[in-house]
Image (tube, rainbow, N blue to C red):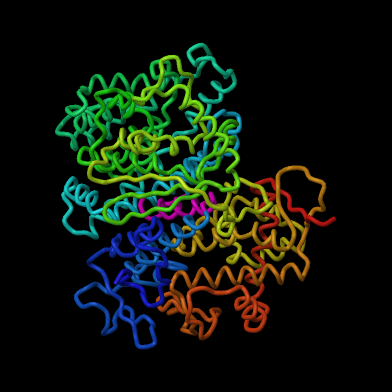
Amino acid sequence: MSYTMLNNSKMRPINYSAESLEGAALSFIRTSCEGLRFDKTKLTHMGFGSDGTAAGPGSAEAERGMVQDLEGKSSRPGQIPYNMEKDVDRLCLENAVERFLGSGKKEDAFDVYFCYLEMFVGDYEKNRRMIELLSEFEATGSGLLMKHRDHYSHSVYVFTLGLAIYESNSIFRYIYKKYYDLRDDCEAAAHFLKYWGMASLFHDIGYPFELPFEQVCSYFEVDGDKRQDRPFLAYHALENFVALSDEMKDKISELYGGMRFDNTNEMFAHILAMKLGEEYRFTPIQMYNVLSDKPTRPDKFNHFMDHGYFSATVIFKRLFEELGIEINKTYLDSLTAILMHNSLYKFSIAHYKSAGNKPLRAELHPIAYMLMLCDELQCWDRTAYGRNSRKEFHPMACRFDLSKDRISVVYLFDSKQMGKVDDFVDKYRRWEKEYVQKDGKTKPDAPKPPKLKAYSEMYIKKGGKNAFQLDIESIVDLTEIKLDVKADFTERSTTNHQRYLSDSNYLNLYNFAIVLNGRWGSIEDWKKARSEGKEEQFLQDPTLIEQFGERFKDLSLEYKLSNINQAKAFSRYLDVIGCFYTDKIVDYEFLEEFSQDELVKIGRLEHHRWLQEHVNMGWTYGTPDKDKRELERRHKDMIEGFTGFEVSQEAASKHYDDELDVETQDKDTDPMECMLVMLRVYDGLRIYRLDH
């Protein structure tokens, strides 16, 4: 059994090859992480009757010897067993990962961040600014740069790729378990999920520090000039930023045999020297000097600012000094992995372009090894923001084969761009014919070869391997875990990557979700505000919004995500009825309210979303007493007799029209009318009709 507290027969099967990225990542969550975050003193297996309903606490089917509790929360606290809530949380993460891998969209990346934070860090509210800042900076500031691509969705891809490699690669699993002295497979997988999630999802969180530096460089950039000839930005007055509190000094001293550090630079330098110093011949003092110079002397590092340094430092301050999470050595492994991933390891530790380079072995630092490997591999489906980046030719998708302890990846480029490829190949062959000697060496007077990034890195080969693969092999040791990289072409598919005309960074998804949930508890006040035309005042009442926030915290992760996904679906619904929202002034008719016909269309769409969401979470039709609904996971508004896993829009629409009463139909349309107001209040957006 994978979900011991849920009815596995009601779970949608994983319909991907076990060796694919999707199949391996989802299998890791569903199978390898069994019992994730369980309290083993409480109920750990749920009995199910012949009709598939949960027998629950107190029943003969429940596992003997366990405390039989109702300490978990669903739509509110105290409805389900504690460990059942943890299984539902894990299923939420599985579904969020599948949604993201199917779309690659930032809005779906948000769900993965949200699940991880709620499950392993704490209330999302306390961490939201840190996450949203990265997305906001990239979307608004990156257009001023010459080179820049997405790091928000990229980090979630890196996260899922690490899960897939761990699941499929017995060599890495063995190394990881040995390094952390983990014997039980499920315990090891849970350990990896927690600490890998921290390293992968937050490795680029310090990018807002690098972006201003690059903006200044881009402002002065002229073809052919050098960075050292231009003004540059550096950070100073960092003493408080890196300083450790007395309490933190004591805690870290206990971890490291009485060693005391005054700041994070000293601490990180000691940890890195302890792990890698002997292999790469550096001392704590030497590493401390490098870390101290990173933010203040970018001229010492080829005029580049290292966001990895800021990511690690920001996360340390946030987790251990602001949120009070109990520090341990493995958390610090995650942070030193983040610290190294960008340029520190390559240019200040291994000097990976030099003749004496030693690629990092997983045995030395398995989390850092996995982060650098996955960070390099994840180059597909990344939004280009920089002016030059938008002109480059990057893979739009990929195919992974993770069988036999190998990593075989085919990067897929848009076949409609073959003109660019043919032009590059023609230029490169002419250059090769003129400047490459018979012994394979380039003539001393040769100009730089033609490039078509990133395709050229996969086209140009040396010794049977392309430049992209050789670069990765110079960073991490792949003598045991074999890598094979190829490029291919295919037609661009928009089936799962639909974008809508509505334009917004959608930074207020969390606010939208809070209000969508909270208004049900104040429905009469909301109706009164609407009748008086005071909806905006209603949504700006600080006392009411605070109450909404408290109600939201009482929800389980499942119900929080349901509200979030309801808000996300709004742009799709608008697209269907010929409307869109934007913060730009455009010459279209304002949408002040929906017509009755539009509300019916929206209601059918929302009911379809709700049905599919519940099927994905293992819910079925039933009419149990209200106090048993969450425990049995049966709902009267599901389709009676439905036994499949994919609900069609046709079936959902028919069920909406024929089976739901008006009051229930209103539950699907009222929130969407509330969204009209929320977009104005929280995002400053207006909704327009496409037809005048």
Q: Furthest-top residue in view? A: 229
Judged from this view, the residue extending furthest toward the bottom is: 50
Left or right for 390, reference 481? right
**Residue in the foreground of this view, choosing between 563 and 165:** 165
Quarter of the figure that contains the C terminus: bottom right
Q: Is residue 205 visible?
A: no
Front residue of 642/52: it is 642
Q: Is the magenta stretch mostly helix, strand or loop?
A: helix
Q: From the top left corner, tell me how far across and down residue 439 is, in percent.
A: 34, 25
Q: What stretch is highlighted in magenta?
A: 104-124
Whether 137 is drawn above or below 608: the answer is above
Look at 45% across and 53% down and name the residue there: 112
Above/below status of 354 relative to 545: above
- Asked whether the viewer can see residue 51, the reply is yes
On the image, the x and y values in percent for residue 556 come to 44, 63
Q: Where is residue 360 in the image (x, y as percent from the top left)?
A: 26, 35
On screen, residue 337 above or below 51: above
Q: Quadrant of the N terminus?
A: bottom left
